[in-house]
Amino acid sequence: MSLVEVFEVRKPIIGVIHLLPLPGSPKYDHKFEEVIKRALEDAKAYVEGGVDGLIIENFGDVPYFPDRVGPETVAAMAVIALRVREEVDIPFGVNVLRNDAIAALSIAHATGGSFIRVNVLTEVMVTDQGLIRGVAHKLLRYRKLLGAEKVRIFADVHVKHAKPLMKRPVELSAKDLVQRGLADAVIVTGEITGAEVELDKVVRVKEAVKSTPVLVGSGINAENVCKYLKVCDGVIVGTSVKKGCLTENPVDVDRVRKLVRVARESLRA
C-alpha cells in the first residue's frame, strides 16, 4: 500500500484530535456538545495549519479498557467522526483506546474514515491496563466480513506506554506485524505520549518492512520533523502543536503552520 492512495501526498502529516472525556468515562463532567465543539475546533485548526489527515482518539477516557469499550463510547465517537467528516475535507482515521480495533473499524467504516490505528495488532504487550493481546486474527476477518478493505490498518510496533512480553528485536516484530498481522502501515513511537523516537529504531523498522509505509507516531515537533521525514513515510503529530505543548489542550494553529511549513520545505529541498 502507498500512503498516496489515502492522503494524496507522498509523506503525509497527520494531526491527532485528542477527544475530551466522553460520556461514561470517569472524567466526563461537561456537556457532550462541548466535546463535539472542541473536536471540530481542533479539526479546523489542523486543516487551516495544512495537515494532510486527522486521527480521532478517545484520549480523555482514562483509565482505558484494555480491549472492548462500552457502546456509549462507540456511539459518541461515531457522532464526532461524522461531524468531523461534515466539517473538513481531508482523510481521517479512528483510534479507540486502548485496543478496541473492532470498534475503531466499525466507526471508520460507518462514517467514511480512511484508516484506523491499532496499538497492539500482534504479539502480547505488558501495559498499565495489564496484558494486551494482539487482535489481528479477529480484526482482519471482521474487515473482510464488513467489506471494509478500503479502511487501512495502521498498527504500532512495540507501542508506547508498553513493553513486549516476548523480548525480540523491533525489526522482527515489524516483519510479523506486516507478514502475519497484515498491517497496511507500521507506526513507531517513543516510550510515552509526546516522547521522541530513537532515529535508529525508525531506520531499522523501515529496513525490515521496506515496501510497507512506516510512520513516526510520537515526539514530532518543528525542530525534529525534518530528520524523521528523511527516513520514514509520514508523521503523526499532537502534543507539540497544542497550546503550551500540553496534550489535553486545544490545537494551536500557529504551531501547526510552523511544523507543516518546515516539513514541506525539507521535502522540497
Image: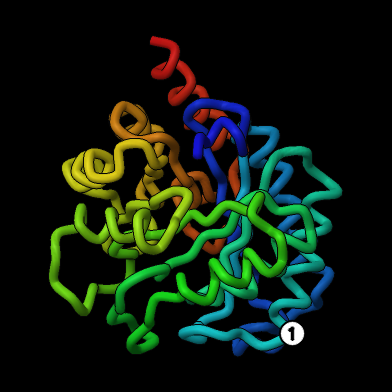
Residue shown at the point (71%, 66%) measured from the top left: 146
Task: Say which of 177 and 258 sits in front.
Answer: 177
Q: Is 260 above or below relative to 252?
A: above
Q: Is 134 above or below relative to 248?
A: below
Task: Say which of 56 and 186 sits in front.
Answer: 186
Residue shown at the point (14%, 66%) measured from the top left: 168
Residue assigned mark 1: 72
Residue shown at the point (52%, 34%) measured from the top left: 12
Residue 174: name its quadrant: bottom left
232 to the left or right of 204 = right
Picture coordinates of residue 29 (x, y %)?
70, 84
Amino acid found under the numbered disc labelled 1: Glu
Residue 209: name its quadrant: top left
Give the quadrant of the C terminus.
top left
Residue 59 appears in the rendering:
no
Q: Secondary structure at mark 1?
A: helix
Task: Say which of 11 and 183 sits in front.
Answer: 183
Picture coordinates of residue 143 (x, y %)?
63, 65
Picture coordinates of residue 234 (x, y %)?
44, 37
Picture coordinates of residue 231 (x, y %)?
29, 31
Residue 197 appears in the rendering:
yes
Q: Is 68 above or below relative to 32?
A: below
Task: Say which of 136 and 112 sits in front.
Answer: 136
Q: Residues within 10 Å of mark 1 (few under 14, many from 20)?
A: few
